[in-house]
Structure formats: structure tokens, C-alpha cells
Image: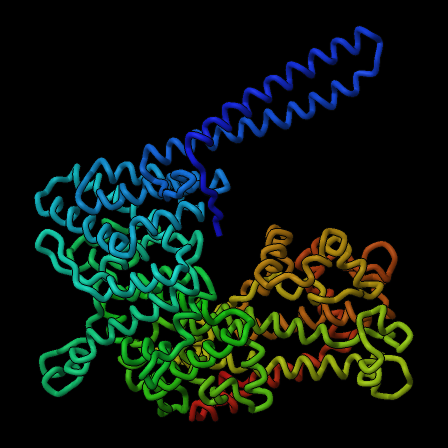
Amino acid sequence: MTEFSGVRLPDFDTMASRHTEAAARLEALAQALHHELRGAGLDPSPAVRLRQLAGRATAQAEDLRRRQRMVHELQRRQVTFGRSTPAGSYLELPDGLEAAQGLLDGTLAGRAALKAADGDTAALAELLSYASRTGDAAFATTFLGVLGAAGVTRLPGALAVRLRDAKARGDAALLGRLSGQGKKALLLLSTALAKAADPGILAGLVKHGRAQHRVGGTTYSGYQAQALIWRAHDGRPPYSKEFMEVVGRDVIVHEYEQRRDAWAASDDALGRFFGGRRLPVADLAGALGLDTLLRPGTHLGAMTSSVVDDLFHAAKYSRETSQALLAHTPAGWKESVLDHLLTTRWDAARHWGDHAPFNELLVSATTGQDATSRKLAAELAKLLADEVRGAFAKSGTGNLEIRDRDSFDRYTPLSLPLARALAAHIDQLSRLYLNRATFEKVTPEDMSYALVLATSNDAGFEALIRAQTEHMRAALNTVPPVGLTTANAEHLGFTQADVKRFDLDGDGRITKDDVKEFLTDRIVEEARPFNHIVETRRQVLIAQGMDDKEADKELTTMVSDAIGLLPVPGATWASRLATSAFGELIGNGYEKLAGAAHDELADHVAQRMSARALDETHQTVRDNRQAVERLAEQMLATSMLNKGLLDELSGEGQIFATGASTTIKPYSQMSPQEYSEFLSWVRDKGGSSGMLDRFSGTLSRTSDVGAYLGLQIPTSGSER
């Protein structure tokens, strides 16, 4: 909060002048004293101390002169306000110079904005000169205070109407100038508005947003004009949570109140006969036929946008603001905002096809690891599963069939944000299928229909595969290393209770048999979610008109060659052989990367290994099930190496070994042939074949997917 001090201007001028004069005299006295002391051969320290005092006085005098200039400028511009007392008249001045500058600039910018709203072209140019000041909180607060909620609403309306008139007259030069200035002015407004948390401003925006406004014979709602400000936002800074709770939520409720009767009429018999449609409320640019003339180039999207879509654009930049909109049930409603948007309003959302803002909002709100993200992700999965469930049935071959294409296509625009939400909560998906549990209100059957929609999108399928890959990697990391005992447990990052749990034969030491048992359990468990993701994707492709062989061909690999070629993230200990194989990466920041997010780790791996194809056969695999099996083999070999299962094996004579027979080349130095030989050696000598068979068998089983989707999937071509 900015503090203010009261000053009497004549007295303040006198104080500044005398302080400046005193500082100069002190400096002169210090110089004279220094000269006299040196001349007498005495210690000049007193003169040095006096000069330091003079320096402080000079700095204070300069500060007073800056404040004096600011006071006079504020008074000249009639920015300050004062009060009279028996002791004289006082002007109020912010204690900080930056705050005072913010008060001055914010006031002048606000006045310019008000004049621009009245059609003053020079004032619009003056307003834009303050664009660089929007990052200052004092400026933004003062600017909005001067402009007020009424001015915030009037300015974009005036800009839009002037642009419409220029377009109607065919004045291309004016049209181009107004479009450029309008975009910059809207961004300035949006940047300032994003900081708004003052209850008075927010309440005023709601009041004027709901009201009808008229400019040059054009009538529009305030929200239609304000929406142009929201769509201009660039996310710096994100809008406040308070803005979305007060203004954002009311925008959604207000649109429904305005369209409720029309939407209901479009669904009755007469409405269906005449092809009635649910229409959203267009923003003012759309209502005036301005297309994207007031929208920054990076935010183009559809030619026409709705008020609500513009709101989504402003809210998408922050998880907190996204959730403030979606995780809410308005007073008197029986459905949440998310439910409303996916059901009641969805046909209106499809009208102009401006899906990007809503999709990005969903991703922002659902992909965190907080409780609200999990709740919204589950609600999204449940709602969409219920909506698309009726579109599918069992075909004559027992595979998935699309019986109602329109019902399926209706929600395909949401397939990617749904996949991103499920990928972010892949642990919930895994527990759902492994334990027949629930994810909030989502059952395994619900999740299966949600996966049908999610895996119908190529990028969505890839996101799910990558997420499950990381889940598997983390699961393998929970397996103990060979040689773990109660004596070294703490050093290796385990507890004594862990040792007792992992020590199956009770000899007090984790043996190779113990490790193999736990590796087998983990790898089989991880095959189940992979199975649901991959087989569901295959069923979707078949339902879209491919036969089994075409579907297998279409299932191209979407998992990076490099995934699985690093030690399991989170590992803080590597076996003797692993230290050699991973030495380069461990020595170049691996420990820091071990806890990094998947995307960071994947980027690092890609940069390290993109120039060297470690496994060329992996690039030519045509079937995703084979790709996942290959991935599992790579990850299992890495884990066996890292956990010490290969330490006692001889690599003598092997092309992947170097120097001593027990030293394995770093992966990044292996040729494709050497890496292939290494995997074969692990299968034959390390005993991974049995584990891989168990993984493959679980991965190939189609009965679970068939049961949840009501199918009888043929075994030929799918279970291998």
C-alpha cells in the first residue's frame, strides 16, 4: 500500500532550497578544513568525516529537488489533491518517488483513455505512449482508478465502432491505423486490468458488463466490449484469481441467462424442424463484422469469437485462474461450470469452432498435481465418457464400431486436452485398472470410453504413451539393488523396513533372485495400462474403417528411441557396470536431471543422442505393441544393469564391451549393432527373457479392454 505525506508547497520549496545550500556549504567547509590540517601537518580525519557528512547532505538535497519537481508537476497537471487546515494548505505526495511517478503517469494515461473513448485521436496516441508503464503496480492502480469500470468498458466499444465505420467507408489507410492502435490499446488495458483485485473495480466491471451501451447508434452489452480486452491478453501477468471469481464467473452465468430461452427453443420440435442452433454471444468485433482486426496476430484463431471464448483466452495463462472458473457451481445451478460448458453450452461452443482457448484452459486447469487438478481431470473424463459412450457398439467382428458418428465427432475437438489431463494423472489410470478402483467418480468402464476419445487423437495417444513410459520408469526405480542390507540401506536411499519387505528368503541381504522377483512384478503391472492405451487406440482405428492389418500398420511408433536409455530417474546409486555405461551422463549433471520433469529429461536425452540412432530397428517397427515391447526391453535392460543384476556376468568377447571384460561401453558410444547385441546378451545371460514374456503376454491380452467396452475382440492379429 502506498503511503502519503502532506506538504505545504511554499515551505517545501524553502526546505529544498536551504538543504541544497547547506550541502554546498558543508562541502566547501570540508575542503577548507582538509587544506588547513594538511598544511599544519595534522591528521585530516576530521575533514574526511565532515566531507562524508557533506556527501549525505548533497544526496538528500538531490532527493528533495526531485520531489520538488514532482510536486510542481503533479500540481501543474492537477493530479494531486490537498486539504486546508488552520496551519495552512497541504498537498498529498506519495512517499516513494516511483509511486509518485506512477500516480502522475497513471492519471495522465487514464485521462487520455477517457478522451480516446470520446473519439480524440491525439489522446489515443498519447495513451499508447504509456504502454511501457503497465508493469508498474502504482501506474496500473491509478490508471484504472481514473478510467473507472465505465471507461474500461467504453474505450474498446468506441474503438470497435470507429473501426467498423472506417471499414464501411472503405478507408484502407484509416482502417490499418485504427487496427494497429486498437490492438495496442487493448493490450495496454488488459495488462493493467490483469492486476486488478480491487473489489470496487471488479464490481464495477460486472455492473457495466451486464449493462447495455450505445455508441454512434450501435447498442451492445458491456461484456461484449470488455471481451476484446481479454482476447488481447498475452499472459504477462496472468489475470488475478479475484478477477475470475468475480467477473469471469459472472460472464458465464450472464451468457446463459441471455441465451437460455433461445437454446431451449432450438431443442424443441419446432426448433429442430427449422434447424435451430445454439448460438453463443459474440464479442463486439464479431457482432460488428470486424473479424480479427482488433486481435493480435498470435491470438487469431477463428474469425469470430464469443465473449466466453475471449474470457477463456485470458484465464488460460494460470492454473489458479483456470481453476477459479471451472471448479465452481454458481448459485442456483445444479451443474458445475465445467459440466455446463461440456453439455448445455457445448453446441454453442462449436458454432464458430474457436476451440483453442477452451482447450488450453482445460489443459491449464487439469494437468497439475494438486487436488483441484485431479478433481477437474476426473470430472472431465467422466463427463466426456458419458457423452461419447452411446456413439459406440460391438461390430459383427467383435471389434469396436462407431454407430453414431455425429455423437463421436461432436467431442473430438476435446480429445487432446482430455488425453493431456489423463496423461498428467497416469498414476490414477494405472490404479484404476490394476486395483479396479475409482478415480473420483470415474470407474474403469468410464475410463475406457474416455480413452477411446483420447487415443483418437495422434498427439493425445503419444502423450499417454510417454506418460505411461515415465510411470513404468518410476515403478522400476522402486526395485532394490542387489546387495542391499540393513547396514547400507540408508546410504542407498532405503529404509530398514524396505530391506525386510524386499528380502524374500529372509537372509538379511537382497539377492539377485529377490530383485528379479520384484522386477517381474513391476513390469507385469506396468504392462496393464500400456495394454489399455495401445489396444484402445487400435480399436479406434478399426472403428474408423481400417481392418486389423491396416490398424497395425497405422500404429506407428510414437516413443522416442532414447526413452529408457538412461538410469531410472530418481536413482542415486548405480552398480559397478552401470557407472561405466552411464558414466558420461552421470558426470554431466545426471543427478540433477534425475528428478527433472519428463519433458526436461526427454529434451536432454534428445540433444545428447539425436545424432546417434542407438536402435535402428526401433525406428522401423510398425506396430505399437511391438514398439512398447521393445521399449520395455530397453528399460528392463537398463534397470537390470543399474540394479546390479549383470555385475557378475562376463562380457568377454562381446562387441559392446570395451577394455576389461567387465566394462560396458557408454550407451552413447554404442553403434546400433552393438546396442542390439547388448540387449540380446541381457536376454540370454541376464535372464530377462522370462520377464519380457510375462510383459508381452499381459500387453497382448485384449480381454480386459473388450470387457469394459462390451466387445469380443478376435484373438487373431491382436493377441500374439
**Residue 397, quarter of the rendered image:** bottom left
Decide which of 217, 51 is in the foreground and name it: 51
Tally of marks: 0
Of all residues, the one furthest to the front in this rendering is 86
Q: Is residue 129 visible?
A: yes
Q: Position of residue 539 (x, y in %)?
A: 43, 82
Residue 499 is left or right of residue 320, and the answer is right
Residue 207 is left or right of residue 441, and the answer is left
Residue occupying the point 83% across, 16% down: 43
Residue occupying the point 36% across, 54% down: 193
Instruction: Please say if 675 is above or below 387.
Output: above
**Residue 170, quarter of the rendered image:** top left
Q: Position of residue 39 (x, y in %)?
A: 79, 6
Residue 4 is left or right of residue 126, and the answer is right
Residue occupying the point 67% across, 80% down: 523
Residue occupying the point 16% across, 39% down: 174
Instruction: Please say if 232 is above or below 701.
Output: above
Residue 114 is left or right of residue 26, and the answer is left
Quadrant for the C terminus in the image = bottom right
Decide which of 218, 231 is in the foreground and name it: 218
Q: Position of residue 450 (x, y in %)?
A: 43, 81
Q: Position of residue 449 (x, y in %)?
A: 42, 84
Instruction: Please say if 658 is above or below 372.
Output: above
Q: Is residue 545 visible?
A: no
**Residue 701, quarter of the rendered image:** bottom right
Of all residues, the one furthest to the top in this rendering is 39
* Coloration mode: rainbow
